[in-house]
Image (spheres, rainbow, N blue to C red):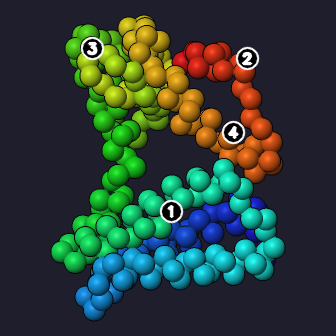
Amino acid sequence: MTFSNETKGMLIGFIGIAMFSLTLPFTQMAVKEMSPFFVAFSRATIAGFCALILLILGKYKLPTKNQIKRLIIIAIGIVYGFPIFTSMAMTTLPSSHSGIVLGILPLTMSVLAAIRYNDLLKLWQLDKKYPLMTNADKIKWIHLRENPYKIDGLAFFDHEIPAKVQEFLNQYADRKKVFESILLNKLEGFFSDLEWSLDLNPYINSLNSFEI
């Protein structure tokens, strides 16, 4: 039986999610017998040895100085921060509660951005003319600069944007933050892997002023 690359990717992704879903239950079992810090550092040590073996067998190049800096920042959060705090949490909370929290986290920003959009439509009395965001709607959201409504991010539809919302986005959208968080980081990583230098001048100003 042969599988397409898309099917293989879905299967590998499913296996990865299934393995990750066991993290909290097994962590809770471990902290009943061992210190949360021992559990966290043991996870990091085992994962590090496995990664080292793959690097040696694959004969991959050593990371560059720029990549090492990024890896250190990532390791502080993923390799140490996440395991330590989840291990500590598992000493007092059931794994089911923690699993719900982990599942909700990625959705929080999108939900809040959608709520802000609906609030603005009601405030500007546009909710009768334009539909509010509801469950299962496909939306986009963007970071905002300092604005009169103290909103950090706002969701919007990629079609039928009210003129007042469009004007608000054009005025307060934080294009620089969007560019740096979504595109620049990926460009820097890509160029760094190729050992190329990235020089965005003289285009940086146009990239920071794109239209929504």
The residue singled out by tag 2 in the image is 202
At a point 79% along the width and 74% down the height, the residue shown is 58
Residue type at mark 1 is Ala
Dot 1 lies on which element?
helix
Q: Which residue is mark 3?
A: 148
- Residue identified by numbered label 1: 75
Find disc 4 in the rendering and name its residue. Answer: 187
Q: CA distance from mark 2 to mark 4?
A: 16 Å
Q: In this image, 16 relative to 132: left or right? A: right
Residue 162 visible (yes or no): no
Q: Position of residue 165 (x, y in %)?
A: 39, 13
Residue 61 drawn at (x, y percent): 79, 65
Q: Is residue 203 left or right of residue 137?
A: right
Say if residue 84 shows up in the picture.
yes
Label 2: how many residues lie within 10 Å, few (<14), some (14-19) or many (20+)? few
199, above or below 126, in the image: below
17 or 26, nearer to the observer: 26
The disc, 3 or 2, on the residue closer to the chain's N-terminal end is: 3
Looking at the image, is mark 3 or mark 1 earlier in the sequence?
1
Q: Quadrant of the C terminus?
A: top right
